[in-house]
Amino acid sequence: MRKFCLLAALVSPLAMAQVVTVETHSLVRLPTTTSVLQLERLEVADYGTLLIPSNVTELNVGELHLGREARIAIVPGEQSLQLKVSRAQLDTGSQITSRGAPGTYLKAARAGRNLNLRIASLNAPELSIDARGGAGAPGYVGLDGGNGQEPGCTWGEAGRGADGDNGGDGRAGAPGALVRVELPRDYPEQQIKVLVEGGVGGVAGAGGMP
């Protein structure tokens, strides 16, 4: 119930007085009623996940704390996300993900969502961002081969069945996102890890049965 109340408070236009808490091993989605959100404090406990919808284009946070293995997961979208944080404490294994969506037989893979991240004050053993593209859809399975001709009534041999068709090629993966990061000048460069590779291609479809 507490989570519900927190999110319900975000339905109205946001002022600089909002606090959102994500408990351990739970997932909370920010509201979709506005494209710009402003939070005084955002706390994601160990192994928790905060989901940022695709229609949110700007999120301003006064104080951010990500626990161990905690996640901020950004849903793929056409518009880039501006994420601005005044003070951030990121624990070991925490991560910001802006990955694309994998392809299916009906939909092509989606690219990672472009991200502009600005943190004015950062305390973290590592800043990890995963903005890789979605994996390609698998290829279609080949059609089965035709049956051979039946032998004659008295003698003869059955005809050889046709070979099955080859399976289809896997679809291409989607490109990774464009990520821009602004951090304090004294934050060590070797502690910044950003993944923006394109998604892997889909596996080829299996050949049809003979």
Image (cartoon, rainbow, N blue to C red):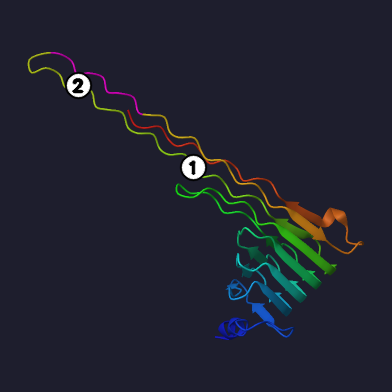
Per the rendering, the mark at residue 149 is: 2
The residue that label 1 is drawn on is: 138
139 w.r.t. 52: above or below: above
Q: Which residues are magenta?
A: 156-164
**Mark 1 nearby-residue class (10 Å; few <14, some 14–19, many ≥20):** many
Q: Is residue 173 left or right of residue 146?
A: right
Asked if the residues shown at circle 1 and circle 2 are in contact, with their CB atoms under 8 angstroms apart, the answer is no
* Amino acid at circle 2: Gln
Give how far across and how far down residue 153 sits, in percent.
8, 18
Identify the image quadrant of residue 6.
Answer: bottom right
Alpha-carbon span between mark 1 and mark 2: 34 Å
Secondary structure under tag 2 reads loop
Is residue 192 or residue 58 the one in the foreground?
58
In the rendered structure, the answer to whether residue 168 lies left or right of residue 6 reads left
Q: Residue at 70% across / 49% down in the picture?
A: 196
Of mark 1 and mark 2, the one earlier in the sequence is 1
Residue 138 visible to the viewer: yes
User: In the drawing, does residue 183 fall left or right of residue 112?
Assistant: right
What is the magenta segment's predominant secondary structure? loop
x and y percentages locating residue 5 in the rendered image: 58, 86
Quarter-wise, where is residue 94 in the image? bottom right
Disc marking residue 75: none
